Structure formats: C-alpha cells, structure tokens
Image (tube, rainbow, N blue to C red):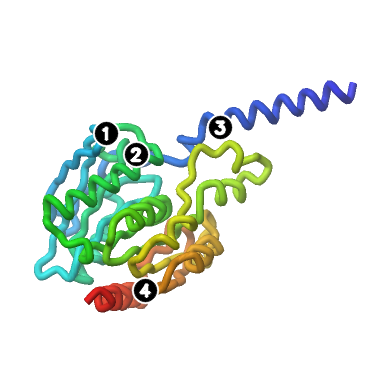
C-alpha cells in the first residue's frame, strides 16, 4: 500500500510543478493590478506630454514625458511588476526637484500600452524608450540616468549594459528570478523550470556607468542580501544606499536624507563623465 501513497504524492508534486511552470507569467507580471491610471501628472502639478512609442516588434507603448527648465539630465524610469506609470508620481516629483527631466514608460500590457509582457518584450520596450530619448529628443547618452525599481531594476541593468548611459540606479532589485524564486518556493525545482532569467547580478559587471544600488534592510519581498550581492557585482564607481521600510513602502523619496544621498550620487556621476 505504501507505494500507492508514494505514487499519489509523486503525481501530486509533478502536477504542482507543472502548474507553476505554466503559470509563471502570472507570478512575474501583474499588469492588471491597477491597469487604469489613478491620475495624470497634472493632478500633481507636473507639466507633461503624452508619448506613444513604437517597439521593434510592433507594440505601442504609452509614456509620460515630464520636462523641467534648465535640466541637469534626464531620468528614464522603469517601474516594478505591478501598477503603472500613474503610480510613480512621487518619483517624478523627486527627480523634478533634483532638476531632471523624466520619462515614465509602461511596459507592453501595462497601463495603455499594447501587447502582453515577456522578458524579451520588456527589453524591447526599454530599447524603444532609449531610442525615443536619444533620437527623437536628441538627448546625449551621457545625460541619461537609467532608473529601475524591483523588476524594473533588471530591465534598467540590461539597458545600461547595451547602451552607454550616464548612470544606472537600481532600487529593491533581485539578483535574478531563479535566485528569488528558489528562496520563495524552496520546495520546487525553480532553477530547472524557470522560463525567466532577469539576471541582474550577471549583467552588472558589464555596466560601465556609475552604479547606485538602493535597498531596504526591512524589505520582506526581496531581501537586502540581493541588494548587497548586486553591489558586490557592480564595477566601480558604485554606491550603496540603505533604506528602511518594506518593499512597498521603503522608497528613496520618503526621507530627505535619502534624496540628498541620491542627489549627491547623481552629481558625482556627472563629474565623472566630464
């Protein structure tokens, strides 16, 4: 009889592994969590332009361009795996205060963007945003700061490896999807079945721009150990900024001293380029 129990458990485990394998997209992306915009930048007193970008594979991305007078540079911001650009207004306000234009872009399948998200798709989205800034707006590479939070940090790192940006900032980002998945789902063979990589740690040593790694010691979703390993992997010049608060409430714009540290990094990054 014991073999029947063992067979039943084995079949059940195999079925669970199969379900997780097939459901990976829904575990990585949450485009329907707040797909509708909660507000426009105008509600926050920010001047902006609606922008629609074309990707190399035919998708249309929605973005907001928030210009400032006498800008010190431009921030290209990639958000995390939930919500959309309308949930990132505090970042836009912060970068405006620091004197930077900001381009907020929604990945395919998020907000008003067409398509369905995928790893290669988000990389194509990042490339389209970069090309709009450098070609359409005519902004020099060295004046662009690539910023990514959580999942967006992996996308930002990929783009900074492929394009010569002025600086890279990654906040609350994992080392890779298989690394994080194996910690969360330790009872599953995540590394064997993962269809996603987003290998930020492998990417970072190839980034030549100055790097700022931001992470909270209290992050309950992506442990701070990920941030520390990313910092170790990055080339110099690099800075680590430790925050406080959980993954969804420990943001750099929440304390004046953190914003000051971010501003100091950006100033130092600019000086290293001239």
Residue 105 vertical placement versus 97 (above, below)? above
Decide which of tag 1 and tag 2 comes sooner along the chain.
1
Disc 3 or disc 2, which is closer to the eye? 2
Pick out the residue farthest to the left. 69
- Quote the CA–CA distance across marks 1 and 4: 39 Å
Residue, disc 1: 57
Pointer 1 with pointer 2, Cβ within 8 A: yes
- Camera-nearest residue between 115 and 270: 270
Q: Which mark is residue 21?
A: 3
- Quote the CA–CA distance across marks 1 and 3: 26 Å
- Quote the CA–CA distance across marks 4 and 3: 39 Å
Disc 1 or disc 3, which is closer to the eye? 1
Q: Secondary structure at mark 2?
A: helix
At 30% across and 38% down in the image, what residue appears?
A: 108
Label 1 packing within 10 angstroms: few (<14), some (14-19), many (20+): few
Q: Which mark is residue 258?
A: 4
Disc 4 or disc 2, which is closer to the eye? 2
Disc 4 or disc 3, which is closer to the eye? 3
């Amino acid at each position: 009889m014991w073999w029947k129990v063992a067979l039943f458990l084995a079949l059940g485990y195999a079925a669970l592994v199969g379900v997780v394998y097939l459901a990976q997209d829904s575990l990585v992306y949450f485009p329907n969590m707040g797909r509708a915009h909660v507000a426009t930048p105008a509600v926050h007193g920010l001047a902006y332009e609606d922008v629609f970008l074309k990707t190399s594979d035919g998708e249309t991305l929605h973005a907001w361009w928030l210009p400032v007078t006498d800008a010190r540079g431009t921030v290209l911001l990639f958000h995390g795996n939930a919500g959309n650009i309308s949930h990132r207004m505090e970042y836009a306000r912060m970068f405006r205060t620091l004197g930077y234009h900001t381009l907020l872009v929604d990945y395919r399948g998020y907000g008003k963007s067409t398509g369905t998200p995928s790893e290669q798709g988000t990389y194509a989205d990042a490339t389209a945003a970069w090309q709009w800034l450098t070609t359409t707006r005519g902004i020099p590479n060295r004046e662009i700061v690539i910023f990514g939070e959580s999942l967006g940090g992996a996308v930002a790192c990929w783009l900074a490896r492929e394009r010569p940006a002025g600086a890279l900032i990654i906040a609350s980002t994992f080392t890779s999807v298989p690394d994080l998945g194996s910690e969360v789902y330790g009872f599953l063979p995540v590394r064997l079945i993962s269809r996603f990589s987003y290998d930020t740690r492998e990417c970072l040593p190839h980034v030549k721009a100055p790097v700022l790694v931001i992470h909270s010691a209290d992050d309950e979703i992506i442990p701070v150990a990920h941030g520390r390993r990313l910092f170790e992997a990055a080339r110099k010049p690099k800075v680590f900024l430790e925050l406080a608060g959980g993954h969804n409430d420990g943001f750099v714009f929440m304390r004046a001293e953190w914003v000051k540290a971010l501003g100091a990094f950006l100033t130092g990054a600019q000086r290293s380029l001239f």
